[in-house]
Amino acid sequence: MYRAPLKDLRFVLHHLIGETTLKACPAHVEYSLEIVDAVLEEAGKFAQNVLDPIYKSGDRDGARWTSEGVLGAPGYKAAYAQYVAGGWPSLRASPDFGGQGVPAVLGTAVEELWAGSNLGFKLCPMLTQGAIEALEHYGSSEQKKLFMPKMVSGEWTGTMNLTEPQAGSDLAAIRTRAILNGQNYKIFGQKIYITYGDHDFTNNIIHLVLARIDGAPPGVKGISLFIVPKVLVKEDGSLGAHNDVQCLSIEHKLGIHASPTCVMAYGQKDGAIGYLVGEANRGLEYMFTMMNAARLSVGLEGYAVAERTYQQSVDWARTRVQGTPPGTSIGNSAQPIIHHPDVKRMLLMMKSQIEALRALALYAAWQLDLGNGHPDVALCAMAKVRSNLLIPVVKACSTEIGIELASLGIQIHGGMGYIEETGPAQAYRDVRITTIYEGTTGIQANDFLGRKIVRDHGVVITDFIKDMRAELNQMTSPVEAVMASKAAALESMAALETVINYILVAHLKAPEQALAVSVPLLRMAGLVFGAWLLTKSANIAAQQLSSGATDQDFLNGKLASARFYAAQVLPQANALARIITGGAASVLETEANFL
């Protein structure tokens, strides 16, 4: 059974982030740690009592396609109705449209609970949230008035439609057409891999669709964004006729069986009615607003599912009796496997990295909040560029490591982990898609390298490293775990600076040399950023322990995570540095026909 990790979420939100800077933002003056605790408490109950109980059945039974439309897995429609009744769809949305307006950092913490308890369910509101943000930024006042209130309330859901059969990540190749039809457009084309493109949870779905207006420039410069409702909406907000939109099929997938992945057809008859969002030919720019939010949201899915697997693995290791641990003082009889050194190593590998990734994702979300409205102009500008720097790292590192940790969870279970009924196998299957969703790891790494480092000659990341170093240098704790973590983190920061300088020169000489090692670069950055946050966490824990805090197991666990991460996780950064500075030739000098 999934248990909401409220204690660690509160630790990050209370102590690593706090409330002061957020309360300075005009949009969040009422934000408080009391609100944090209240929201997390209720979200934890919903995750544990509503979403977790249908997690396994959703995998077993799955969503089902019919000629009349897609039917959700048993229990999911009812769960969504409870989700709406609880006001959860409106949590992060603007109060102008009926939303509660909580900051992204709190919304991100809540999203982890949905993803950890039931990833197949979580994907539906995630896409709606992204559609809401895109319309809020770029929709006309009439479009916002017509569509957003019911999306914010959860009465309607939303999607984004990018991918086509011939155009995966290469959106320049899309062929969906938009033909002017009076004041609106008719849309013709097919989209694939559309998450929750159809379902029976609501009576309408608002699709955001990329299409090319006839006569538009070729490539990405000729792509526009359209609102295409499943059911047309009248001026008074009531529903009209069914639009020319149909789900042709749903995919048979490795995991997330409760989440329908749809093949969508637009304009099989007279054309689907679509409403242009913003200006023509700027659709990809607009969609990236939606994708940026989705990348952070998908990133947290990686460590959220790993958290679920970690909980299962700890429970299993505490109760599975097998063998006598070497050097144990417990006795000569068989003992729970949690006392075996390698099992402890695997559990620490999971625990330390989950805590590092959680802290990094919440820090990135906090920077988004500050960048969207802090009154200090300099702080606002810094937060904006820092969040942009971090989002590809969160997305790629959290999902790649999430897969690795889910696999470790199976290993801890031994042969029973490979059996579906035990639990960790489903998590492993579910999390596998996350490195592909919203841009593969390679796409994130190229974005991190090109747009976030090379474009500004490394200024943002170098300033970030300087700030991290300054924070660590202010720590004077004599606690061994803090000192060890601090020393290792500072060493890794120096190595990252060296690597950044190398990359800037290499890219200037030959961009392909840098691109050949962009993924190792991103992974190294993620490791270093995680070390910084775990060191800060350990320092806080040490201070609380010295002040007589009562929750000693949790706080000592923070020290253990930082110590282990410094000793067995962070050394990977040195290996990655060697790959980055010496590994490009082995890729570039290999001919395609050698493979």
Image (cartoon, helix red, strand yellow):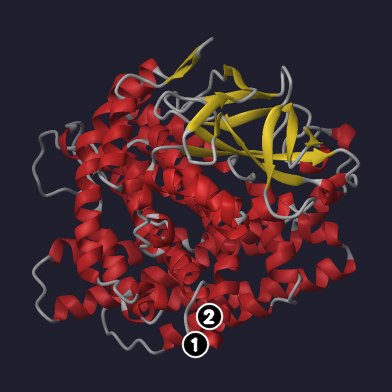
Residue sitting at x 82%, y 48%? 220
Quadrant showing the C terminus: top right
Q: Image check: 17 left or right of 67?
A: left
Quadrant showing the N terminus: top left
Residue sitting at x 63%, y 57%? 138
The amino acid type found where label 2 is placed reads Cys
The amino acid type found where label 1 is placed reads Asp
| Disc on res. 376 | 1
Q: Image check: 429 left or right of 440?
A: left
Q: Quadrant of residue 76?
A: top left
Relative to the observer, which residue lies in front, 139 or 165? Answer: 139
Q: Quadrant of residue 139?
A: bottom right
Relative to the observer, which residue lies in front, 56 or 317? Answer: 56
x, y percentage for residue 374? Answer: 47, 80
Relative to the observer, which residue lies in front, 125 or 409? Answer: 125
x, y percentage for residue 66? Answer: 50, 11
- SS label for mark 1: loop
Give the Cα separation between the discs numbered 1 and 2.
Answer: 6 Å
| Disc on res. 187 | none
Residue sitting at x 52%, y 74%? 371
- SS label for mark 2: helix
| Disc on res. 380 | 2
x, y percentage for residue 22? Answer: 37, 76
Residue sitting at x 53%, y 28%? 240
**Callout 2: few (<14), some (14-19), or many (20+) C-alpha neighbours within 10 Å?**
many
Residue 556 seen in the figure:
no
Q: Are marks 1 and 2 in contact (CB under 8 Å)?
A: yes
Q: Quadrant of residue 178?
A: top right
